C-alpha cells in the first residue's frame, strides 16, 4: 500500500496506490493539491486497514503525484546527522539534534521541477529519509517513539549554500527548492531501521548511506522534537543527509538546469525531479 495525493485537470484527490492503479478515498475535490488536505497521512495503520474498498480507480499514469503532506503539517528537518557529513563540513558532533524548519511551498512532488533560484547558483542536493508522524504526542520517550511513526517517504532538502551561510532559514526555504514523495509507505509495511539511502545526480550516485548510520536515530529525533513541539499526525521529520554534498567537492558540484536528481530509500521508492532555472 502506498498513500498518494494526486491532481488532474484542476482537481485533486487522495488514495491508495496498488501497482499502477490509484484507488481514490473520498473522491475528487476542486482546486490545487497544495492547498488540499491529506487525511491519509494522518491515519493510524488500523484506520488505513479498515478503509472500505471500491473507490474510483484511476491509472497512475493519468495523474500527477503531489507532495504527500497536509498543508498545516510541520516540516521539521534534522541537520548534520551523519558522521561522514560532519567530517566533510568540519563540524564537531553535537550532543543533541540540530533542527530547522521548512515551509510547505519550498517543496514539490515527484517529477515536478525543483527550481534553482535567481539569487544564487550554489544550489546543492541533500537526499534524506522522511518520517511521517502517525500518532500525536509530547514528551515522547525514546523507547515509545516508533509507536508514533505513521510512515516513510523520500526527501530532497535542496540548499542554497550562499544564503545558508548567513541564514539557515533562507538557505533552506527558497520556493520549490526541495521535494518530497513520491508517496508515503505506512510504517506497518516497512521497517526502515537499516534501509539504504542513495542520491543520484544525472544517474551518478553522489550520496550513499544506511539509516543505521544516523547519529541520532529516528527514535531519538522524535523524542527530542516532542520535548518542544506538539507532534501531530501528518507532521514530517526529515532525518538528515549523509556525506557527498556538492558544496564539499572539488570543484563544487552544483545542481543546474537540465539536471535530474533522484533520492531512493530502500523499501519506499524513488523520488525523481528535473532541475530548472527560476524564470
Image (cartoon, rainbow, N blue to C red):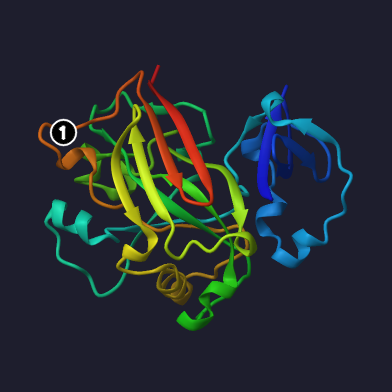
> Residue 110 in the image: x percent, y percent?
53, 34
Residue at the spot 37% in from the left edge and 45% down from the top edge? 198
Q: Locate the C terminus by quadrant.
A: top left
89 on left or right of 26: left
Residue at the spot 69% in from the left edge and 39% down from the top edge? 19
Vertical relation: 97 (above or below) 247: below
Residue at the spot 65% in from the left edge and 39% down from the top edge? 35
For disc 1, the neighbor class at 10 Å (few under 14, some 14 to 19, many from 20) is: few
Kindly indicate the quadrant of the structure image that contains residue 114: top left
Vertical relation: 227 (above or below) 272: below
| Secondary structure of residue under mark 1 | loop
> Residue 142 in the image: x percent, y percent?
46, 80
Most foreground residue, 248 or 203: 203
Residue at the spot 23% in from the left edge and 50% down from the top edge? 243
Q: Mark 1 points at which residue?
A: 252
> Residue 219 in the image: x percent, y percent?
45, 73
Vertical relation: 148 (above or below) 249: below
13 on left or right of 183: right
Most foreground residue, 226 or 202: 202
171 on left or right of 262: left
> Residue 122 in the image: x percent, y percent?
23, 32
Amino acid at each position: 500500500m502506498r498513500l498518494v495525493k494526486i491532481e488532474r485537470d484542476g482537481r485533486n484527490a487522495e488514495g491508495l496506490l496498488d501497482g499502477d492503479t490509484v484507488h481514490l478515498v473520498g473522491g475528487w475535490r476542486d482546486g490545487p493539491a497544495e492547498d488540499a488536505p491529506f487525511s491519509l497521512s494522518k491515519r493510524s495503520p488500523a484506520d488505513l486497514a479498515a478503509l472500505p474498498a471500491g473507490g474510483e480507480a484511476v491509472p497512475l499514469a493519468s495523474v500527477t503525484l503531489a507532495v504527500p503532506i497536509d498543508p498545516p503539517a510541520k516540516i521539521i528537518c534534522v541537520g548534520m546527522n551523519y558522521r561522514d557529513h560532519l567530517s566533510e563540513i568540519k563540524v564537531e558532533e553535537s550532543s543533541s539534534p540540530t533542527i530547522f524548519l521548512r515551509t510547505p511551498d519550498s517543496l514539490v512532488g515527484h517529477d515536478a521541477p525543483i527550481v534553482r533560484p535567481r539569487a544564487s547558483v550554489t544550489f546543492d542536493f541533500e537526499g534524506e529519509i522522511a518520517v511521517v508522524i502517525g500518532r500525536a504526542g509530547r514528551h515522547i520517550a525514546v523507547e515509545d517513539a516508533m509507536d508514533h511513526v505513521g510512515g516513510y517517504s523520500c526527501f530532497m532538502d535542496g540548499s542554497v549554500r550562499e544564503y545558508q551561510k548567513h541564514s539557515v532559514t533562507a538557505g533552506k526555504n527558497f520556493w520549490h527548492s526541495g521535494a518530497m514523495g513520491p508517496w508515503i509507505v505506512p510504517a506497518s509495511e516497512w521497517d526502515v531501521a537499516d534501509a539504504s539511502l542513495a542520491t543520484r545526480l544525472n544517474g551518478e550516485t553522489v550520496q550513499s548511506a544506511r539509516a543505521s548510520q544516523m547519529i541520532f536515530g529516528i527514535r531519538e529525533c522524535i523524542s527530542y522534537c516532542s520535548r518542544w513541539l506538539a507532534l501531530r499526525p501528518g507532521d514530517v521529520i526529515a532525518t538528515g543527509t549523509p556525506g557527498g554534498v556538492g558544496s564539499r567537492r572539488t570543484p563544487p558540484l552544483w545542481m543546474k538546469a537540465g539536471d535530474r536528481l533522484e533520492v531512493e530509500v530502500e523499501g519506499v521508492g524513488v523520488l525523481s525531479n528535473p532541475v530548472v532555472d527560476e524564470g
